[in-house]
């Protein structure tokens, strides 16, 4: 079944009733008094709300009927837990409940599973990172974490990436003087493992640079400015820009 068809999970969507807010509140009061008939009527009267929410989760390869049924579970939870004493519209409370139920379903049914050994390694890496940060008063590099645990750098990277939450392509990773670099800017054209690991290593190396070095690289390679233009903007000589740029690139090369 698809959303643009008349029926989904055996429900004729063209005949679904839409309740007014006053009708919802009246039914909710009866539900709180144990009226099962009112509860069923409230569920039926909010199925269009479920449909509107599940459309946001389309395109993930899931059966719409399954999503609709899961959304209905979220709706029922919203009805059973809604506090009628609060000055809040029912839909304002129900939508996050329905969305949350759908997210849990998609998470639990995700075919991509992180192995126990990979998770354990990631947690060891995070503990080592915290320990090294405390001892050295600065954030350690991937190499330092790998040495502390006694595993390869690539294994640390894979483990940490496996348990990390997905980022938006427009998530900012660096900002300086109003100029922001996003995740999208860090993605290369090739998709093989070596290039992927190099991208991560490059970002790691950049974080170890000083603020001035970061700004110079940003102006030179992300904004395409000449050394003379960079010198004028930062307020130093062109020779200093050249020296700092070379120093920063050398540091990055050593890291990756």
Image (cartoon, helix red, strand yellow):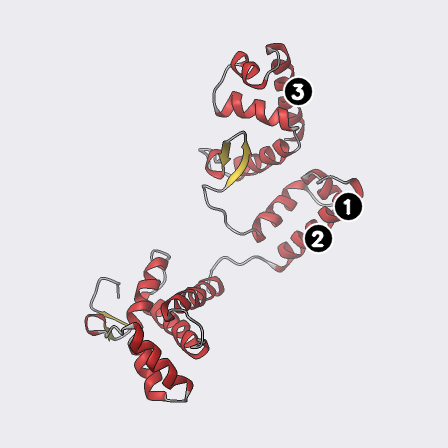
Which mark, by number, is residue 74?
A: none
Whole-Å distance between the Cαs marked 2 and 1?
A: 15 Å
Drawn side of residue 7 relative to residue 98, left or right: left
Q: Mark 2 or mark 1, which has the lower sequence index?
A: 2
Q: Residue at x 34, y 65 (%)?
A: 63
| Element type at mark 3 | helix
Q: Residues within 10 Å of mark 1 (few under 14, many from 20)?
A: few
Which mark, by number, is residue 247?
A: 3
Q: Residue at x 74, y 44 (%)?
A: 133
Q: Residues within 10 Å of mark 3 (few under 14, many from 20)?
A: some
Q: Residue at x 32, y 88 (%)?
A: 37
Q: Residue at x 65, y 46 (%)?
A: 156
Residue 25: quarter of image: bottom left
| Element type at mark 2 | helix
Q: Badge 2 is on which residue?
A: 124
Q: Badge 1 is on which residue?
A: 134
| Element type at mark 1 | helix
């Amino acid at each position: 079944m698809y959303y643009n068809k008349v029926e989904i999970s055996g429900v004729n969507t063209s005949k679904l009733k839409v309740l007014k807010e006053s009708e919802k509140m009246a039914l909710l009061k009866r539900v709180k008094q144990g009226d099962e008939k009112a509860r069923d009527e409230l569920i039926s009267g909010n199925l269009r709300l479920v449909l509107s929410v599940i459309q946001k989760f389309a395109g993930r390869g899931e059966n719409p009927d399954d999503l609709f049924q899961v959304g209905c579970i979220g709706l029922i939870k919203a009805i059973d837990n809604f506090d009628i004493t609060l000055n809040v519209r029912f839909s304002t409370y129900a939508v996050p409940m329905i969305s949350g139920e759908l997210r849990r379903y998609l998470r639990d049914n995700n075919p991509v599973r992180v192995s126990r050994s990979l998770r354990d390694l990631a947690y060891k890496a995070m503990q080592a990172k915290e320990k090294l940060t405390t001892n050295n008063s600065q954030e350690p590099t991937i190499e330092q974490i790998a040495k502390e645990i006694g595993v390869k750098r690539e294994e640390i990277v894979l483990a940490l990436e496996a348990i990390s939450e997905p980022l938006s392509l427009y998530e900012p990773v660096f900002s300086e003087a109003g100029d922001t670099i996003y995740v999208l800017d860090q993605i290369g054209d090739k998709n093989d493992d070596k290039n992927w690991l190099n991208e991560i290593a490059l970002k790691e190396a950049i974080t170890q640079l000083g603020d001035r070095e970061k700004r110079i690289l940003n102006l030179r390679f992300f904004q395409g400015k000449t050394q003379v233009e960079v010198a004028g903007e930062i307020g130093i000589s062109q020779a200093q820009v050249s020296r700092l740029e070379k120093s920063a690139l050398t540091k990055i090369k050593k890291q990756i």
